[in-house]
């Protein structure tokens, strides 16, 4: 073998050795990089795990802190102008008032015969109907002036705990400017009496209940809100009832009468009613004085 041939063979072996060494070096470098990256990633993972555990521990401790004492964080109310729905239970109010609500039917001449439908001899038919409520245990009743218009004698029906009580009644007083009238029945025993509330405390948006006994029916109710408080503190309810309810009470959640419904969307406030009743000699009339008001009819 010539020197030239040996030189070429040696160079080829050197290149082959250099290639193997390069591959080994590269593998070592990549291994080191992988190990370092794994260590860093492991540390970051542990840090994330510690943060998550910290969050979970704070979340568990928070309820325990509330159990240790009352939460004094102030509650934030709804933004101005927003309406919050609220449920109110009128069961107790109705149970108190409905015993005082009566159905009123007027008639001309002698009382018609033939049952509740008013059938009778010609000229003796019913002349009107409406609702009222008892304001004195002596049998005095509030109703509308329209109910007693052109009629002087009445039949008053009251439903109480499954029993029906029927009375004869006559007109005591009429207040045309307020649309109200006072009747007196011929009852022999004390009658359940409605409780008058302070109508000056009624505000727009308050829940309110209308109770009526139209056409001789047992008392029925319609709930709504006070849509506005008008001139002279007149309470204007939102619900529509029909004339059979006119003369019936408007009742708040406590069962107090705060107004008398005289037509749809309009009523006479209880404080004005007090002023009117001061003009009538009604015995055993409760709740005529309200602190802060003189009870004037206005």
Image (cartoon, grey):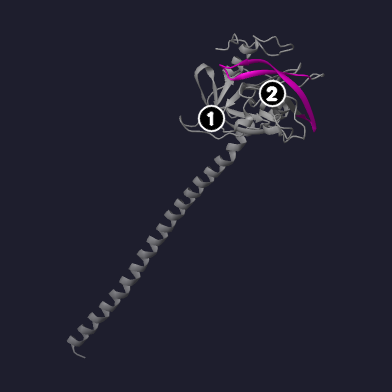
Does the magenta portion include 168? Answer: yes
- In the image, residue 275 sits, relative to residue 28, either above or below, namely above
Please identify the quadrant where the C terminus is shown.
top right
Q: Estimate the x, y position of residue 269 in percent, counting from the top left.
A: 58, 19
**Location of residue 34 (image quadrant):** bottom left
Please, what secondary structure does the residue beneath circle 1 have? loop
Reading the chain from its start, which is encountered first: label 2 or label 1?
1
Q: Would residue 196 be found to the left or right of residue 137 on screen? A: left
What's the magenta bit mostly, secondary-structure-wise? strand
Q: Estimate the x, y position of residue 296 in percent, counting from the top left.
A: 58, 10
In the image as oriented, which residue stretches furthest toward the left?
Answer: 4
The residue under label 1 is 75
Stretch of the chain drawn in magenta: 159-186
Q: CA distance from mark 2 to mark 1?
A: 43 Å
Task: State whether residue 287 appears in this view.
Answer: yes
Q: Estimate the x, y position of residue 126 in percent, counting from the top left.
A: 69, 30
| Classed neighbour count for the residue bearing mark 2: other residues with Cα under 10 Å, few (<14), some (14–19), many (≥20) | many
Residue at point 37%, 60% (across, down): 33
| Classed neighbour count for the residue bearing mark 1: other residues with Cα under 10 Å, few (<14), some (14–19), many (≥20) | few
Residue at point 52%, 16% (across, down): 232
**Location of residue 290 (image quadrant):** top right
Q: How many marks?
A: 2
The residue under label 2 is 133
In the image as oriented, which residue stretches furthest toward the front?
Answer: 122
């Amino acid at each position: 073998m010539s020197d030239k041939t040996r030189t070429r063979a040696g160079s080829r072996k050197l290149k082959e050795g250099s290639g193997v060494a390069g591959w080994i070096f590269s593998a070592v470098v990549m291994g080191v990089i992988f190990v370092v990256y794994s260590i860093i990633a492991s540390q970051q993972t542990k840090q994330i795990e510690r943060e998550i555990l910290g969050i979970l521990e704070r979340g568990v401790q928070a309820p325990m802190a509330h159990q240790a004492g009352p939460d004094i964080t102030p509650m934030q109310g709804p933004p101005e102008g927003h309406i919050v729905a609220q449920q109110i239970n009128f069961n107790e109010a109705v149970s108190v008032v409905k015993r005082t609500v009566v159905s009123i039917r007027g008639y001309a001449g002698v009382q018609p015969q033939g049952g509740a439908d008013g059938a009778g001899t010609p000229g003796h038919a019913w002349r009107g109907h409406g609702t009222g409520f008892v304001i004195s245990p002596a049998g005095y009743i509030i109703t509308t002036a329209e109910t007693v218009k052109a009629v002087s004698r009445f039949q008053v029906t009251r439903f109480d705990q499954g029993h029906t009580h029927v009375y004869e009644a006559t007109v005591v007083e009429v207040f045309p400017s307020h649309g109200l009238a006072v009747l007196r029945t011929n009852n022999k025993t004390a009658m359940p009496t409605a409780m008058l509330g302070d109508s000056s405390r009624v505000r727009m948006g308050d829940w309110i209940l209308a109770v009526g006994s139209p056409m001789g029916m047992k008392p029925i109710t319609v709930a709504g809100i006070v849509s506005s408080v008008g001139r002279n503190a007149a309470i204007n309810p939102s619900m529509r009832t029909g004339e059979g309810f006119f003369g019936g009470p408007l009742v708040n959640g406590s069962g107090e009468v705060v107004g008398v419904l005289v037509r749809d969307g309009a009523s006479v406030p209880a404080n004005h009613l007090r002023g009117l009743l001061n003009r009538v000699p009604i015995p055993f009339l409760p709740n005529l004085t309200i602190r802060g008001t003189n009870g004037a009819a206005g």
